[in-house]
């Protein structure tokens, strides 16, 4: 890592977190920028709405910013950050469970203005693939929050089950069970997509990683602004 703006090159995640706790005003921003793409992808896929995901990620980073001094090093810093992000997402999902609506995929607003997105226009995609992706994302959004979080981390982000168990604070068997139940529900919801294909029965179309764009802009006391967590670059 090249030295920039006085930052020390090559510092580990733990060194950055400890430096932040010791008063280094740039350390947390550097840590967030290092992991923001994956944290944003987890938040977006877990919640399914761009604005909600941005708010959840900002909440999570503010929590991490404040709790840094209490980090005991029992897990990797990235595992700790992911746990905070997932918990922030699950809290938001639970709070809105009183509403009957299902979140629309990737930041489509429900304010009567189709096509508005907080992170810029969606990239062009073949119509069939785009429609399939929308259906898959809506099906994912219909899963119970805990199953959705496990599937996002294991199947979409590709984390090992053991690491996901640490992120979620549950046993490995619980992660496997949630993934299995989630995949079964997705297979039932998406069975019609197998028509005319060679996919074996029960196979779920691969979940896409979405329209990742690197968030830019740093602005709050934690080094993380809402603009930073809601914007993405191609």
Image (spheres, helix red, strand yellow):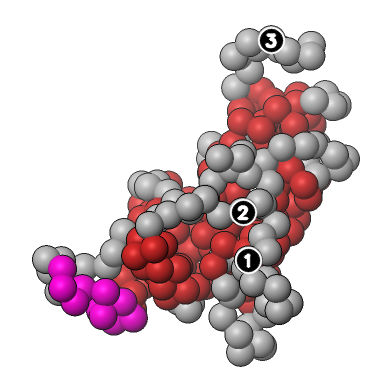
Please give the count of numbered marks on the rendered protein. Answer: 3
Instruction: Name the image quarter holding the N terminus.
Output: top right
Dot placed on the residue nearer the N-terminal end, 1 or 2? 1
Spatial CA distance of label 1 from label 2 is: 8 Å
What residue is shown with label 3?
Answer: 3
Tell me which residue sits at (75%, 55%) in the image.
Answer: 59
Can I make out residue 214 in this image? yes
Dot placed on the residue nearer the N-terminal end, 3 or 2? 3
Whether the residues at callouts 3 and 2 have beta carbons within 8 Å, the answer is: no
Tell me which residue sits at (26%, 74%) in the image.
Answer: 193
Closer to the camera: disc 1 or disc 3?
Answer: 1
Q: Is 197 above or below relative to 56?
A: below
What residue is shown with label 1?
Answer: 115
Tell me the magenta residue range.
187-197
Q: Is 83 above or below relative to 111?
A: above
Relative image position of residue 175 (x, y in whole percent): 38, 62
Relative image position of residue 87 (x, y in whole percent): 62, 61
Spatial CA distance of label 1 from label 3 is: 40 Å
Main SS, magenta region, reads: helix
| Label 2 crowd (10 A; few <14 / some 14-19 / many >=20) | few
């Amino acid at each position: 890592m090249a030295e920039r703006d006085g930052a020390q090159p090559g510092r580990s995640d733990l060194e950055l977190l400890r430096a932040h706790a010791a008063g280094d005003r740039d350390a947390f921003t550097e840590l967030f920028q290092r992991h923001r793409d994956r944290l944003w992808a987890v938040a977006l896929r877990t919640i399914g709405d761009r604005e909600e995901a941005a708010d959840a990620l900002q909440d999570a980073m503010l929590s991490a910013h404040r709790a840094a001094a209490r980090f005991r090093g029992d897990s990797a810093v990235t595992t700790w950050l992911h746990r905070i992000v997932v918990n922030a997402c699950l809290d938001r999902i639970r709070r809105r469970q009183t509403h009957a609506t299902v979140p629309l995929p990737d930041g489509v607003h429900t304010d009567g203005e189709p096509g508005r997105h907080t992170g810029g226009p969606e990239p062009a995609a073949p119509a069939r693939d785009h429609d399939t992706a929308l259906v898959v994302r809506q099906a994912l959004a219909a899963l119970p929050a805990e199953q959705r979080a496990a599937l996002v981390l294991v199947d979409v982000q590709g984390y090992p089950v053991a690491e996901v168990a640490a992120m979620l604070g549950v046993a490995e068997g619980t992660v496997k069970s949630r993934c299995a139940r989630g995949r079964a529900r997705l297979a039932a919801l998406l069975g019609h997509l197998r028509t005319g294909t060679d996919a074996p029965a029960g196979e779920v179309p691969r979940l896409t990683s979405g329209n990742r764009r690197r968030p830019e802009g740093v602005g709050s006391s934690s080094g993380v602004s809402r603009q930073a967590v809601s914007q993405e670059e191609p």
